[in-house]
Amino acid sequence: MDPTLADAEAVRAELKALDAYIDRLVNTCNHLAEENRALRDQQANLIAERATLIEKSELARSRVEAMIARLKAMEVGT
């Protein structure tokens, strides 16, 4: 076999392997970008849920404090 032909075939094989590797990298980047978007959406949802839970907790605390104040007022009145 001609040495230059063998070199050309080797280069083609290396280019084919490099092309496959680049395709895998692009697929990995696309997958990671989608995963990142999903995680950011999840984070935003969790932050909103946390804010809602904090608000509900504050409301419950206020109601309990008001009940305690009313009970104390009833004790003093009796």
Image (cartoon, rainbow, N blue to C red):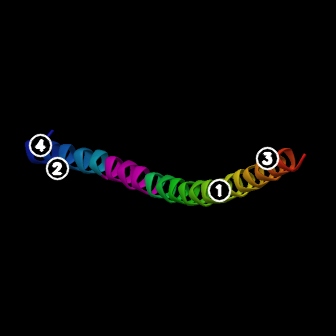
Considering only order in the chain, which callout, 3 or 4, is on the residue closer to the N terminus? 4
Above or below, comparing residue 56 to residue 9 in the picture: below
Label placed on residue 72: 3
Task: Find disc 4 in the rendering and name its residue.
Answer: 2
- In this picture, is 47 found above or below 14? below
Judge the density around disc 4: few (<14), some (14-19), many (≥20) Cα neighbours within 10 Å. Answer: few
Q: CA distance from mark 2 to mark 1?
A: 61 Å
Q: Residue at x 13, y 45 (%)?
A: 7
Q: Earlier in the sequence, mark 3 or mark 1?
A: 1
Describe residue 9's horizontal placement relative to residue 23 as left or right: left
Mark 3 or 1, closer to the camera: 3
Residue at the spot of label 1: 49
**Furthest residue toward left:** 3
Q: Nearer the viewer, residue 25 or 44?
A: 44
Q: Dot 3: few (<14), some (14–19), or many (≥20) neighbours within 10 Å?
A: few
Start-end of magenta stretch: 19-30
Residue type highlighted by circle 3: Lys
User: Residue at coordinates 23% horizontally, 45% vertically from top-left?
Assistant: 14
- Residue 29 in the image, given as x and y percentages of width and height: 39, 54
Q: Is residue 76 left or right of residue 48?
A: right
> Please, what secondary structure does the residue beneath circle 4 have?
loop
